[in-house]
Amino acid sequence: MNYTFIHENKEYVLSNDNCEGLFFEDENEITGLSFDIILEALNNSNDVNFSNEYYVGKCQCGEQEKINKSYRYLEYHFYIYTKNNTYVINTISKEYENTSFNKLFNLGKVDDSYIINVTVCPICGLYAIEVSQCTV
Ligand SMILES: [Zn+2]
């Protein structure tokens, strides 16, 4: 699965080939969460909008301009909810439109939440996905 988007007239394709990795905070992997699930979530949503964010780490291409001790990336994030450390739903899906974490929590369907950060180098298109525990 690929995900394609346009930012400032440049096309970026997120695929298996240019992914630096799927990183879990504290190496705490979530059952059922994969690259394909994340790229599929992006593909199925109309709300995805990458914006400029600045981080101290430089991409391995070495081509980014240094701006105030940091480097520009394109970033988009959304949330996923889990139950017993297993993926249940993401917040940009159609299934999520008419519900909320609290509703699902009260129904016993979810018990934890994570933020998915997708960070893309604007020069070479290399990207990374970070998954971190995050209280709603
Ligand atoms: Zn790069």
Image (tube, rainbow, N blue to C red):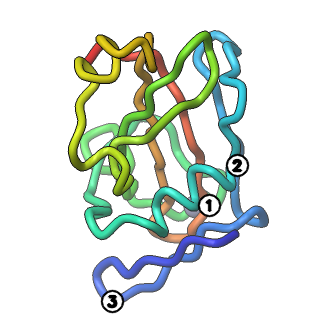
Disc number placed over residue 9 in the picture, else none: 3
The image's mark for residue 20 is 2
According to the picture, the residue beneath numbered tag 1 turns out to be 126
**Does label 2 or label 1 sit earlier along the sequence?**
2
Going by the numbered disc 1, the residue's amino acid type is: Leu
Front residue of this view, candidates 131 and 72: 131
Q: Residue at the spot x=43%, y=77% of the render?
A: 5
- Tell me, yes or no, if residue 75 can be seen here: no
Graded by Cα atoms within 10 Å as few (under 14), some (14 to 19) or many (20 or more), the crowding at tag 3 reads few
- Ligand 1 neighbours mark 2 (CB distance < 8 Å): no
**Which part of the image, by quadrant, shows the N terminus?**
bottom right
Q: Residue at x 59, y 47 (%)?
A: 128
Q: Nearer the viewer, residue 73 or 22?
A: 22
Residue type beneath disc 2: Glu
Q: Is residue 19 above or below residue 32?
A: below
- SS for tag 2? strand
Contact check, label 2 and label 1, Cβ < 8 Å: yes
Screen quadrant of the C terminus: top left
Q: Quick check: is the Cβ at mark 1 less than 8 Å away from ligand 1?
A: yes
